[in-house]
Amino acid sequence: MELKKRIGVWLAAALFCFAMQCKAVWDMRSAMPEAVVFSSSSGVGVSVQQAETALDRAAAAEEQTGTIAFPPLKQEKAVRLIAATINYAAAVGMRFCAGGWFGPDAVLQHRAFAIIPDTLALELLGNDQAIGTELLIQGEYYRVCGIYRADRRFLPRACAGELPRVYLSRSPGWDGAEEMLATELLLWSEEQSTLEQLRETAQSAAGGMLSGSVQDLRCVRQFACQLCLFTIIGAGVWPLLRWANQGMEALIGLLRQEDKTPRDAMLQIGCALWGLAAPLVTVWGLSCLVQLPQSWLPPEQIFDWKWYLERILIFYQALFSGPQQYQALTGCYLPLIAAWGAAALLCCLVMEQWLFYAFAGKRNML
């Protein structure tokens, strides 16, 4: 009974670590678009209006610093004002406390709507459900149509930026002139599309020359899933090794035993085949059930270590090149995923080693 309790404790700890790691991966993927991001503080060469009308699979935002105030309080607050496309909220995985994102009618009619964070709503309005309130932004009145959650689980406050982010349905001070250039452009793409192909496609569609720094968020999302998969594979290696070790012991015992009956010989041969062939059959069966994407594996051979090192290098180059909000996002989530994975591996390793010592009473596994 004591043995079963200990086994249950270790299994529960390992499953808990696996579950938390998968939860962190899920949160990260839901908060990070599967896209390539072009960003520049001076503009990327395409306006928000061009991205809205000319690009099918794109989201854009124009950012500037300004002030926001609730007239009855007569108190101004510095914020980051972001005029964005109608699909921007879905692109970045925005979650709302109340209301929602503005629709296409607001953009076509140039109606002034604002989406503010819940922290700013509590500070200015005293309520994170105050939909319909009018705020004074850069001398113009905007009606609040949505209040989003500024802080995510596992994320520090620094991920939201130094100033609160306020999203607008049109640029402040819009007077019918041509819209300013977008400072951030997200392009959804297939896994096989290169950065140059995406750049050429966007330039031909929008008629502008894309510029600024580029961050490929696809490899960041993929790297998070690979970390989780590596944990599962690493945890499964230990019981498979012990399984194969029992088969080797049975085979060696068969060869060393001198006076053995045919029945004993058949039993030992069966144990040897079970210990040696069953792990291989298990690995083959799992490989048939779990189909990995083609881009996750080297094109020529699976043990192409140079290919893996290049992929890691590409990932870190994408991680440490703006925009700042995605850099903070990945910088917070990825260490958390790795930490939960290391804890899961440690739990599985200690559990397997303890069970081996308890049953076999030996000091070495192999």
Image: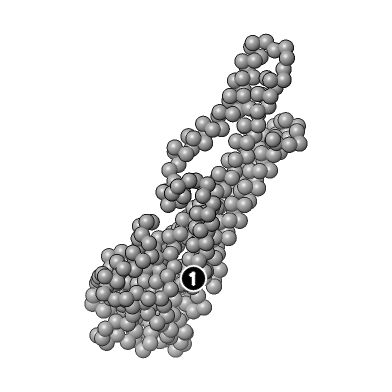
Q: Is residue 345 above or below residue 166?
A: above
Does 140 appear above or below 224?
Answer: below
Determine the residue positioned at 47% across, 84% down. 78
Image quadrant where one finds the N terminus: top right
Residue 134 in which image quadrant: bottom left
Q: Nearer the viewer, residue 55 or 90?
A: 55
Residue 308 locus on image (x, y percent) = 52, 54
Q: Residue at x 29, y 71 (%)?
A: 203
Q: Residue at point 54% right, 71% down?
A: 157
Give how far across and how far down residue 342 sits, in percent. 62, 52
Local crowd at mark 1 within 10 Å, few (<14), some, or many (≥20)?
Answer: some
Q: Report whether residue 148 is seen.
A: no
Specify whether residue 288 is in view.
Answer: yes
Q: Quadrant of residue 116?
A: bottom left
Q: Which residue is mark 1?
A: 321
- In screen coordinates, is 92 left or right of 11? left
Amino acid type shown at disc 1? Ser
Please state the horizontal and vertical placement of residue 163, each as a whole percent of the image: 49, 79
The C terminus sits in image quarter: top right
Q: Say if 339 sits above or below 353 in the image.
A: below
Judged from the image, the secondary structure of the residue bearing numbered disc 1 is loop
Which residue: 35% across, 57% down? 190
253 relative to 139, above or below: above
Q: Residue 159 vs residue 171: left or right?
A: right
